[in-house]
Image (tube, rainbow, N blue to C red):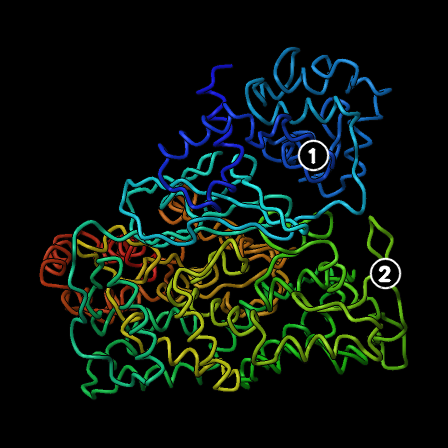
Amino acid sequence: MRVGNIASKVLSDNAELLRRIGMANRVRVRLVVLLMLAAGSWPVRAEPYTPQNFENDIIPILTRFGCNTSGCHGKAEGQNGFKLSVFGFDPEADYEAIVHEGRGRRVFPASPTASLFLRKACGDVPHGGGVRIDRQRPEYERLRAWIAVGMPFGSVDDPVIERIAVEPRERQLAMGDRQPLLVTAYWSDGRTEDVTATATYQSNNEALAAVDENGLVSIGQTPGAVAVMASYLGQVDVFQALIPRGETTEVSELGPAPVGSSGASHQIDELVLRRLAKLNIAPSPICDDATFLRRVYLDVIGTLPTADEARRFLADERPDRRQRMVDELLERPEFADYWALKWSDLLRVNRRVLGREGAYTYYRWIHDSFAANKPLDQFARELLTAEGPLSESPAGQFYKVVPKPNEMASTVSQVFLGVRIECAQCHHHPWDRWGQNDYFGMQAFFTQVKFKSSPLGEMLTSNGNAATKHPRTGAAVLAHPLGEVEPEETPEGDRRELLADWLVAGDNPWFARSLANRTWAHFLGRGLVEPVDDFRLTNPPTNPELLDALAQQLVDSGYDFRQLIRTIIATRTYQRTTRPNESNARDEQNYSRFPMKRMDAEVLFDAVCQTTGVPETFVGLPGTRRAIQLWDSQSSHYFLTLFGRPVRETACECERVAEPTAGQTLHVLNSPDIHNKLRHAGGRIGRLERELPDNGELVDELYLTFFSRRPTSDEQMPLVAHLANSANRREAAEDIAWSLMNSLEFLFNH
């Protein structure tokens, strides 16, 4: 080997030593290296690193190249007779599969390169996954060296990984920029290692930034904040990028602050504007009264305003009319109907599991809680610690719909903390810090829960000292909350009481933030953490200061849900128009304008029934009622199913499908049921046509009914002419109503 090449290798192998002696000038260092080589005095590392620990050295390679993912050998049944644990959560089993299974034919230490394990990976023999590791890559050499030294598994005294760190941590990057990442692993023996090439990466928003397998981040053409996760041996860290628009924009408020804005509302607006200023995005102006009226009705009570309510509000000249209207809506019975529906989805009020009586009493407890404005911390505590006869403690039905301790732990975590821990039941969470010990520590809170018969009916109890064991090690796992140190002794009494104390404590890192985030997402169309039930280190909030402020306001108010709603609605941020300006047309995550939101299935169907004046009778339920009053999610109804009503089989928000589909559009256009409501003899359209002989008044009333506003002159004139020139005025009115119902203005909340 030429001396110059040796010098380059020495520089690479001894970079840390060179850094310590302080020679920053590379030319001087190269000269010193050559002189020391000539004198034979340089401490050259003659041999490459030899892997000695299967978990530390080999598992990361299997993960990096996708060998142990669920799409390859990590799936439940394995692949072509070779099965690995997902993401390497069970190193002992993986070692057994590679070294001993298949009569040991996968590895051949006498001739490592002849090992089937390597020949498949590099493509020497046919492999369903294709060529995974090129022979020239250092990972191939590490695998070969491990086989050559006899495939050591390692010992309990070997160092373990403590954390990884991504550099840089944060950067402001322009659209189209690229940013390479450096990932360093820190080991328990004090050693550090560059694991950039072996780590795995994922962006939490591909539209803003993509990341390749080598950790190179490519910024897109949309402004916002994005997080890129790096993962290695179960440890994770995050790089965050702020991406402003290329053009500088002066960000200032347009118009006066809404009447009724509190200090809390003002703080929210300031935090939103501060982020918009960093991104060079100007906000849209505040919407008009008619838009605000319709928006607030739909968001607060899931109900359209009637024509009379719209007319009355639009004629109100009091400066605090918006605030007054919100206060009135919060006291209406539809408020409890709507929010009981939403929380019945999360808490899974399911007749198929609970029976008709059980599901209804469970629903009534949720409904009555929101009707009474029960503080959210009390609501959560009552559900967690429910006990006694179910006839007296209907919140206990929760433990029937999720009957296993592991399901209880996962559901409570996802609903009230916004943290998904379910995958940690089998392996370390691939995108968060949670492992099996964390999962079973949460499960241990619920192993005392049992049902038994009593003179008062079925009774929920919580007693005994049922043990929870780690499924892989067999060690006992004592009850402890997420992120907390496991206690040395099993807690006495009902462990759920301890969990409830921790859950609703003001300093809990998730409870208030999760509830605030869910509420914010409902009103603003997108959570600060999105999805709303996926809080994790690798999915940070787009505006952390704003989320913290909302959570603190919720805590300070005593978890008053209605007060949180008042605060959000009183902001400029909520009251903005949907119309974009030049700077915010591509902004989808920073609340510079109000989003177009598709209505929930139940809300939209109620709007169809209300505007046509023809109520609905639902299968299995007596009389007519509104869809937001349905406690039975299993009540058969084609419209509700088509428009994404959840089946309440899981606690995931994703059960409710919010994306519009072609089938939905075609249904509103062509449905015989909707057509029959429009032309019903006793319906609203027929009545208005009979009672309003003046064509201008009829068009006005139709617009107030469907859009909660009056038509513009450009809208009114052709419709008046259509009514006047039609041979059948009734059919003409029905045609107008049909066209209004099929418009985006009707189908979306805006």
What is the x, y in percent for residue 83?
A: 75, 30
What is the x, y in percent for residue 97?
A: 80, 29
| Element type where label 2 sits in the image | loop
Query: In the drawing, does residue 135 fall left or right of residue 612?
Result: right
Query: In the drawing, does residue 296 fall left or right of residue 54?
Result: left
Q: Give the spatial CA distance, label 1 vs label 2.
A: 27 Å
Query: In the drawing, does residue 286 fall left or right of residue 484?
Result: left
Contact flag, marks 1 and 2 (Cβ < 8 Å): no
Query: In the drawing, does residue 297 fall left or right of residue 230?
Result: left
Vertical arrangement, residue 182 with respect to residue 243, above or below: above
Query: Which residue occupies the foreground of this view, 334 or 472?
Result: 472
Q: Label 2, on which residue? A: 476
Q: Is residue 210 among what the camera can see?
A: yes
Quadrant that contains the C terminus: bottom left
Residue occupying the point 76% across, 39% down: 91
The amino acid pointed to by label 1 is Gly
Q: Is residue 742 among what the camera can see?
A: no
Q: Residues within 10 Å of mark 1 (few under 14, many from 20)?
A: many
Query: Which residue occupies the foreground of this view, 319 or 418?
Result: 418
Residue occupying the point 31% across, 68% down: 272
Vertical arrangement, residue 84 with respect to residue 688, above or below: above
Give the mark, 1 or 2, whose residue is nearer the N terminus. 1
What is the x, y in percent for residue 571?
A: 31, 76
Direction front: furthest residue? 39
